[in-house]
């Protein structure tokens, strides 16, 4: 396939930054906005449907995990990626300018958008493209990709066509997960494909991709899309009763990736109010009224300090896996050469014949924890 015509943008226009890195970082202060109308709408829907307890959480447990430290670093946008500004690395920039091909799959971004949309088998079984479509200031499992550099981030934010391509990448993955972007202004998404939603729920590595996508939308200041994506996932879990395997990831990890403070706090309050912790607090209050002592419990603001009741690591080995472990299939994906349709059909057959253990929330959480830096 022939390459698209290159951007009308001379290299000299982006090789010399228009502002210093420190100036750019100081411009990353997040706007103080009212809570997203999508969150308000979700709260009304939950109240109307009288949704009760959905999440099982506990107030004590792992509080300083590898994943939580990673999320805290991500929230500190003034310092996130501060040390990544190698002027010799520009593959992410050039990829979004349609000048660089992905490795190992050897395709341009225009080709991915044109030929891969709706190709669910390809999107499921290839793993090397996600780091190219959603670059962040962190290493991924594809050793042929590069972490986003600060000068690349600055240049991409200035390029309208590149940002349109990022939205197209987001819509490509939304379709793969069974959603559709309804409104680019508010970020609202809706469920459109139950088969793909079920695939999403039963293939845990997709949870790791969600973490990267949410971070990338935040990195490029697409705050309404970021909140809209999360609220859509939360609605699916709480009202449609789907994505049950993703409850832990949603509560403890994805919610902490939201960069707008007002939205993050509000959705975490929703999660708390529909968790066993809230029920326990209500019981304690009843006991106190009857003269009982009850247990002292406070309402959390950041769920990074709460752990799922099913996620406690059973051994030091589990904790090490949480930090370092990646299943061999995903590790091999980073070393894969260009893969054709026959190759991933063969891989699909092997996986179907393999004797796999059932998916559990424990696996979901451990995978998510290790993947905040190593996500696909």
Image: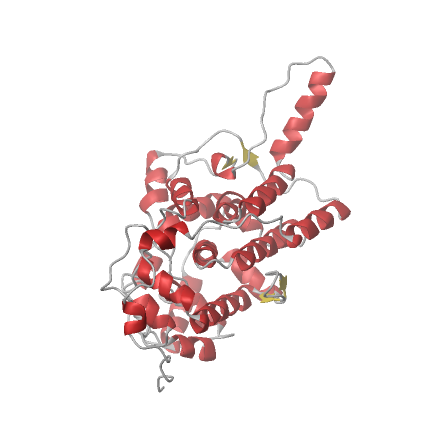
The x, y position of residue 278, in whole percent, is 64, 32
Residue 19 lies, with reference to residue 253, above or below; the image says: below
- Image check: 85 left or right of 368? left
Quarter location, residue 53: top right
Residue 348 lies, with reference to residue 79, above or below; the image says: below
* Near-viewer residue (157 or 182): 157
Seen as rendered, the residue at the extreme left is 88
The x, y position of residue 154, in whole percent, is 37, 61
The x, y position of residue 14, in whole percent, is 31, 69
Quarter location, residue 224: bottom right
Q: Quadrant of the C terminus?
A: bottom left
- Image check: 239 left or right of 113? right
Seen as rendered, the residue at the extreme right is 48
Q: Residue at x 33, y 48 (%)?
A: 325
Asked whether residue 371 appears in the rendered view, the answer is no
Give the total number of marks visible in the rendering: 0
Quarter location, residue 139: bottom left
Q: Residue at x 58, y 24 (%)?
A: 297
Q: Residue at x 40, y 43 (%)?
A: 67
Residue 3 lies, with reference to residue 65, above or below; the image says: below
Seen as rendered, the residue at the extreme bottom is 2
| Protein image colouring | secondary structure
Q: Quadrant of the N terminus?
A: bottom left
The x, y position of residue 185, in whole percent, is 60, 64
* Near-viewer residue (84 or 329): 84
* Near-viewer residue (147 or 60): 147
Residue 208 lies, with reference to residue 168, above or below; the image says: above
* Near-viewer residue (118 or 303): 303
């Amino acid at each position: 396939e022939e390459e698209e015509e290159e951007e009308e943008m001379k290299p000299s226009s982006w090789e010399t930054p228009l502002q210093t890195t420190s100036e750019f970082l100081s411009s990353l202060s997040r706007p103080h906005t009212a809570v997203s109308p999508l969150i308000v709408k979700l709260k009304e829907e939950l109240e109307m449907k009288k949704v009760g307890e959905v999440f099982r959480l506990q107030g004590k447990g792992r509080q300083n995990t590898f994943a939580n430290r990673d999320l805290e670093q991500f929230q500190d946008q003034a310092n996130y990626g501060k040390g990544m500004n190698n002027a010799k690395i520009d593959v992410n920039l050039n990829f979004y300018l349609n000048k660089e091909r992905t490795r190992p799959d050897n395709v341009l971004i225009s080709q991915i958008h044109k030929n891969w949309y709706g190709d669910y088998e390809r999107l499921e079984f290839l793993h090397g493209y996600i780091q190219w479509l959603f670059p962040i200031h962190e290493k991924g499992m594809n050793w042929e990709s590069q972490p986003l550099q600060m000068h690349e981030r600055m240049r991409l934010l200035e390029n309208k066509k590149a940002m349109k391509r990022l939205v197209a990448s987001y819509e490509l993955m939304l379709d793969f997960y069974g959603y559709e972007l309804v409104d680019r202004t508010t970020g609202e998404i809706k469920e459109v494909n139950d088969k793909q939603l079920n695939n999403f729920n039963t293939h845990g590595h997709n949870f790791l991709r969600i973490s990267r996508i949410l971070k990338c939308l935040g990195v490029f200041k697409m705050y309404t899309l970021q909140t809209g994506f999360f609220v859509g996932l939360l609605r699916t879990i709480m009202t449609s009763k789907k994505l049950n395997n993703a409850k832990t990831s949603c509560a403890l990890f994805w919610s902490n990736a939201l960069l707008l403070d007002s939205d993050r706090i509000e959705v975490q309050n929703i999660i708390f109010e529909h968790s066993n912790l809230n029920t326990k607090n209500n019981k304690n209050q009843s006991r106190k009224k009857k003269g009982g002592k009850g247990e002292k419990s406070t309402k959390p603001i950041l769920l990074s300090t709460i752990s799922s009741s099913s996620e406690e690591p059973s051994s030091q080995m589990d904790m090490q896996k949480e930090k370092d472990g990646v299943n061999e299939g995903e590790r091999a994906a980073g070393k894969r050469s260009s893969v054709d349709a026959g190759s991933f059909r063969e891989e699909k057959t092997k996986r179907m014949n393999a004797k796999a253990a059932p998916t559990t929330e424990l696996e979901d959480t451990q995978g998510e924890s290790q993947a905040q830096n190593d996500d696909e």
